[in-house]
Image: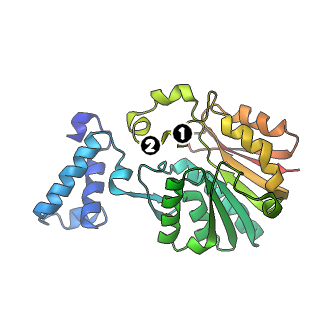
Amino acid sequence: MLQNKGAESARLECEMLLSHILGWQRHELYLRKDWILTEEQIQVFTDMLQRRLDGEPIQYITGTREFMGLPFFVDKRVLIPRWETELLTEYVLGVLRKKNQPAAVLDLGTGSGAIAVSLAVHFPRASITAVDIREDALQVARENAKRNEVLSCIDFYKGDLFSPLKPARYHEYFDAIVSNPPYIPTGEINGLMPEVREHEPASALDGGADGLFFYRRIADQAWRYLKEEGLIAVEIGYGQSSSVQELFLETGAYQGQEVHKDLAGIDRFLVFQKK
C-alpha cells in the first residue's frame, strides 16, 4: 500500500511502525519473525498505516524522533527536528567542551527543545535558556526536558524572540546564542512536500516574504545579550548564506563569521562573534 502511494522507504516505515507497536528494536522483527500479533495490535498498526497513507509524517504517528542520540517526543505542535540541525548543535557543543567551563546558552525558537535539551544533556555545565512564542511548543519542549532528565537545567520562556528576557538580568549574559528560526519564504510554503506543508506548524516554517524576517531581528538584537566575544550560531536555508551574513555584518556588532556546510556541501549554518 505504501509502495503504491509512492513511499520511497515503504518497508522501513512499516518496520518502524511495527517496532513501535511491539516495543522492539527493528532487528527483533527478524529474530522473532514467527511472533503472532494480537487483534488489538493489528488494529493499531492498520490505523497507523492509514495515517501514513494520508501523508502524516511517521514521526508524528509514533510520537518519537531521535536527535543527538536522545529520544524526543514530537507531535503537530512542533517542527520535526532535522539531522541538519544536529550539525549546528554539535558545533556549539564542541565549542562549549573546548572551553570546558560553565556557560550560559540561549536557544531562540526552541520548538521541541531538541537543541536546548541536547546541550543540557551533553554538557551539564551549561545553563540553558529556551524561548518560544507558542505555549503549545513549550509544553512539548518541557516534556522532552523531563524525558531526558534535564528539566531543572533549562529555563523556559514564552515570548517573541528576546522579548521575554528582562534587560536588567540578561544584558551581556550569554556565552552563546543558537537558533534555527523559520526561514522558508512565504511564497514557497505551498511548494513544500505535502507532509511538511499540511502537517508541520506553519509558524515554524514561514520566514516572511524573503525568508529573512527573523534573521534581521536576531542580528539587530542579539549582541545586546551576548558577552564580549560571545558567539551566535544560526541555521540557514538554501541560498541564504550571503544575505544572512550581510544582515549580521552590516550591524557592525559582529565579526569573524564562519560558514559551515552540511553533508551535501550546502551552506547550512553561520557563526558570528560579538565584537
Does the CB distance between marks 1 and 2 fall below 8 Å?
Answer: yes
Q: In x, y percent, where is residue 163?
A: 71, 51
Secondary structure state at the residue bearing disc 1: loop
The residue that mark 2 highlights is 200
Kind of residue at disc 2: Glu
Spot occupied by residue 141 in the image (x, y as percentages of width and height): 52, 60
Mark 1, residues whose alpha carbon is within 10 Å: few (<14), some, or many (≥20)? some
**Which label was assigned to residue 221?**
none
Q: Secondary structure at mark 2?
A: loop
Gap in angstroms between the C-alphas marked 1 and 2: 8 Å
Residue at 28 percent of width and 44 percent of height: 52
Mark closer to the chain start, 1 or 2: 2
Residue 101 falls in which quadrant of the image? bottom right
Q: Is residue 89 above or below residue 146?
A: above
Q: Horizontal placement of 29 versus 100: left or right?
A: left
Count the numbered circles shown.
2
Look at the picture and state if 158 lies above or below 24.
above
Vertical comparison of 254 with 16: above or below: above
Question: Badge 2: few (under 14), some or many (20 or more) residues near its Cα, within 10 Å?
Answer: many
Q: Is residue 135 left or right of residue 129?
A: left
Picture residue at 77% right of the left edge, 68% below the top: 99
Seen at 59% across and 58% down, the residue is: 115
Q: Amino acid at mark 1?
A: Leu
Instruction: Name the quarter where the N terminus is drawn.
Output: top left
Q: Which residue is mark 1?
A: 205
Residue 6: give x, y in percent of width and height.
28, 34
Locate residue 192, reporting x and y percent.
46, 31
Q: Is residue 243 above or below residue 95?
A: above
